[in-house]
Amino acid sequence: QVQLEESGGGSVQAGGSLTLSCVVSEYLFKYACLGWFRQAPGSEREGVALVDRIGITTVKSSVSDRFSISKENTGRRIVMQMSNLKPEDTAKYYCVADSTSAGDCTGGLRVWREYNYWGQGTQVTVSS
């Protein structure tokens, strides 16, 4: 059973916008801390944004003026809206879940190993 399924990546020019969507399994939607990580070539995976079971969000400070995350009960999705994209945003973006958290995202954007469910990822490429 697919637990997390991303969509919405693509190629845009700098300054453009993209919306990433992740359909989440029923259990994870109710009981997991959910979010997005990204990994650029040659770099470690880094946390970008989280949303807890009641919709409280955490966004990486360096992108918080451009990225936002939300939880949509209809369709059981989390959505990350990205605007004013920059070439350094180029990465593969992963939808993630921590099912051990009882839906809390306490501690903010923790190391990637602490998230035990990962989607397949969706590529975002921003050209200058």
Image (spheres, grey):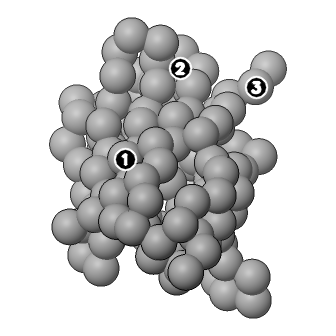
Q: Is residue 108 visible?
A: no
Q: Mark 3 sits on what residue?
A: 2
Q: Which mark is residue 81?
A: 1
Specify whether 10 is left or right of 28. right
Task: Point out residue 119 in the picture as x, y percentages from the top left corner.
Answer: 70, 43
Pinpoint residue 30: horizontal percent, then vertical percent.
41, 22
Bin the neighbour count of mark 1 within 10 Å (Cα to Cα): few under 14, some 14-19, many 20 and up.
some
Query: What residue appears at the point 25 percent right and 75 percent down from the top-left corner?
Result: 61
Name the spot of residue 26 as percent of width and height, x first: 53, 15
Is the Cβ of the residue at disc 3 closer than 8 Å to that at disc 1? Answer: no
Left or right: residue 65 compared with residue 92: left
Against 86, residue 80 (above or below) is: above
Q: Earlier in the sequence, mark 3 or mark 2?
A: 3
Point out the tag, 2 or 1, that comes first from the N-terminus. Answer: 2
Residue 14 position in % (x across, y down): 47, 72
Secondary structure under tag 2 reads helix
Which is in the foreground here, disc 2 or disc 1?
1
Q: CA distance from mark 3 to mark 1?
A: 23 Å
Q: Is residue 80 visible?
A: yes
Q: Are marks 2 and 1 in contact (CB under 8 Å)?
A: no
Amino acid on which disc 3 is placed: Val
Q: Nearer the viewer, mark 3 or mark 2?
A: 3
Relative to residue 110, is residue 19 depicted above or below?
A: above
Height in image: 71 above or below 41? above
Earlier-in-chain disc, 3 versus 1: 3
What's the CA distance linking mark 3 and mark 2?
Answer: 12 Å
Q: Nearer the viewer, residue 33 or 22?
A: 22
What residue would you read off at disc 2?
A: 27
